[in-house]
């Protein structure tokens, strides 16, 4: 495929030397007028990224992440110089979601769904979508669209509650625009530009630009309409043809050897994780996290937890979680870690990752789950079944007992498990109660079976819970 491309490129070059340049040259793209500064793009993207990471579970697999980042770096290096902003910080993370999608935020943060990597037939196809998204960023489409007074439309966010995340000095008028972190819907014109620049970036980075067009077909074949890339990026034969037409004028830069087996290895690795949840399932599993300074994502350790931890401090600090919906007191030597839609409070050494999954050995977590049942016991059973998915060692031990949480009827369920990181048996206590809107609020307390020192801390935390619904 690359050989044929090279031939076309040579023929094109030969033709260019014989014909008026403009007739056969690649399409020139220009910036749209933009009221915002490059710094605004960076600031907006940073806020949106924080929001995104509180809503989407990231795949904690350093091998996969660094692979995607390498592809991303290669593409970024292929951005034409007039669209390079040295201030932008392109970053690449993988979202553990099945939907075939990817999105990039102003100033550079990019998120690639695991489903996108799994669906692509080649690295080039995956790179195609990334190059398209990078092009929106490089062309500053987000703020350009806002400059025209058009809103960033909210495409459902993950929970339909993608909030207004803008504000603060320097952002100005944008602060009033509803802004979805999930996906920005751009005009047809912007989409075409991102396709064309994407194709140019692909060629410069050594990929066949037609793989961007091919990816549309791959997504279509997989029925990737609903919720996926195509719902925000309507495919059409026009579009496919337009990319391929542009590709004729592009010379693929073939310098640098790439091992195409890397992509197969990464897909193989992802298959080992079983099926990722869909965005809709992630949404149903709970409400989004608050965005706070204590978000653990930044400093989340790559290594498994040691399980060697200090005893809970006798001093407690009061913390507000779920946007003030819940207050709770936790030992002052524990820190907050936001994991997907749940909030954990853990001592140092008690959390880390194993096989790409977050693992905790000691600590308490809180979450809100959507339930099909108004009956507390069956709603709790649903949640336990959810937890048990992909967790073969999890067993309920004994039945439910009644307790109370902030004066409400609650159930306490005891589960046993083998800790994924340490291999030690552990006890998990699950306390559930219903919120006014019918959602299930839960607390999970986990500690190794033979460590008794945490019992009283868990009881004290449970007694401190105040729910403001
Ligand atoms: Zn697009």
Image (cartoon, rainbow, N blue to C red):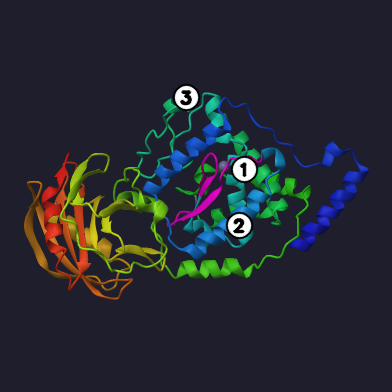
Locate residue 157, reporting x and y percent: 40, 42
Q: Within the magenta stretch, is there residue 217? A: no
Of the numbered discs 2 and 3, the one sitting upstream in the chain is 2
* Residue 303 picture location, percent across and down: 40, 66
Judged by depth in the image, the label closer to the viewer, 1 or 2, is 2
Q: Is mark 2 within 8 Å of ligand 1?
A: no
Q: Which residue is mark 2?
A: 71
- 54 relative position to 39: left or right: left
Magenta residue span = 84-110
- Please tell me whether residue 80 is drawn above or below residue 260 in the rendered image: above
Mark drawn on residue 172: 3
Residue drawn 17% across the image and 60% down it: 430
Is the CB of the residue bearing disc 1 within 8 angstroms of ligand 1? yes
For marks 1 and 2 on the same chain, the one whose residue lies earlier in the sequence:
2
Marks 3 and 1 sit apart, C-alpha to C-alpha, by 24 Å
Q: Quick one: SS at disc 1? A: helix
Q: Residue at x 40, y 40 (%)?
A: 156
Residue wearing tag 1 = 135
């Amino acid at each position: 495929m690359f050989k044929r491309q090279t031939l076309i490129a040579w023929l094109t070059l030969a033709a260019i030397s014989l014909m008026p340049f403009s007739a056969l040259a690649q399409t020139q793209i220009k910036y749209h007028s933009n009221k915002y500064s490059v710094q605004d793009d960076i600031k907006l993207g940073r806020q949106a990224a924080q929001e995104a990471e509180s809503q989407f579970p990231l795949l904690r697999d350093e091998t996969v992440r660094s692979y995607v980042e390498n592809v991303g770096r290669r593409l970024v290096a292929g951005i034409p110089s007039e669209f390079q902003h040295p201030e932008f910080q392109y970053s690449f993370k993988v979202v553990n979601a099945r939907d075939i999608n990817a999105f990039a935020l102003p100033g550079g943060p990019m998120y690639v769904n695991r489903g996108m990597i799994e669906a692509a037939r080649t690295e080039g196809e995956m790179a195609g979508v990334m190059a398209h998204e990078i092009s929106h960023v490089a062309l500053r489409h987000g703020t350009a669209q806002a400059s025209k007074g058009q809103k960033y439309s909210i495409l459902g966010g993950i929970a339909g509650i993608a909030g207004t995340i803008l504000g603060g000095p320097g952002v100005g008028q944008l602060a009033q625009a509803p802004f979805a972190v999930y996906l920005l819907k751009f005009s047809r014109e912007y989409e075409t530009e991102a396709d064309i620049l994407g194709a140019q970036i692909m060629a410069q980075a050594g990929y066949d630009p037609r793989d961007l067009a091919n990816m549309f077909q791959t997504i279509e074949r997989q029925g990737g309409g609903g919720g996926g890339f195509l719902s925000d990026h309507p495919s059409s034969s026009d579009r496919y043809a337009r990319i391929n037409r542009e590709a004729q004028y592009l010379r693929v830069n073939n310098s640098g050897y790439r091992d195409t087996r890397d992509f197969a290895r990464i897909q193989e690795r992802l298959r080992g994780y079983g099926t990722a949840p869909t965005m809709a399932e992630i949404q149903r599993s709970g409400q989004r996290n608050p965005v706070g300074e204590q978000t653990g994502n930044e400093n989340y350790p790559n290594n498994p937890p040691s399980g060697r931890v200090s005893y809970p401090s006798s001093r407690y600090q009061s913390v507000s979680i779920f946007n003030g919906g819940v207050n709770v007191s936790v030992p002052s030597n524990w820190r907050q870690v936001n994991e997907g839609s749940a909030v954990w409070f853990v001592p140092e050494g008690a959390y880390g990752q194993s096989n790409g999954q977050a693992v905790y050995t000691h600590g308490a977590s809180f979450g809100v789950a959507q339930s099909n049942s108004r009956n507390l016991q069956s709603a709790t059973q649903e949640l336990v079944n959810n937890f048990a998915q992909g967790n073969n060692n999890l067993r309920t031990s004994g039945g439910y007992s009644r307790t109370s949480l902030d004066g409400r009827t609650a159930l306490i369920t005891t589960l046993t498990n083998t800790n994924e990181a340490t291999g030690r048996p552990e006890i998990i206590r699950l306390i559930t109660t219903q919120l006014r809107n019918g959602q299930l609020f839960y607390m999970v307390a986990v500690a190794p079976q033979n460590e008794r020192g945490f019992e009283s801390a868990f009881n004290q935390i449970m007694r401190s819970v105040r729910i403001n619904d």
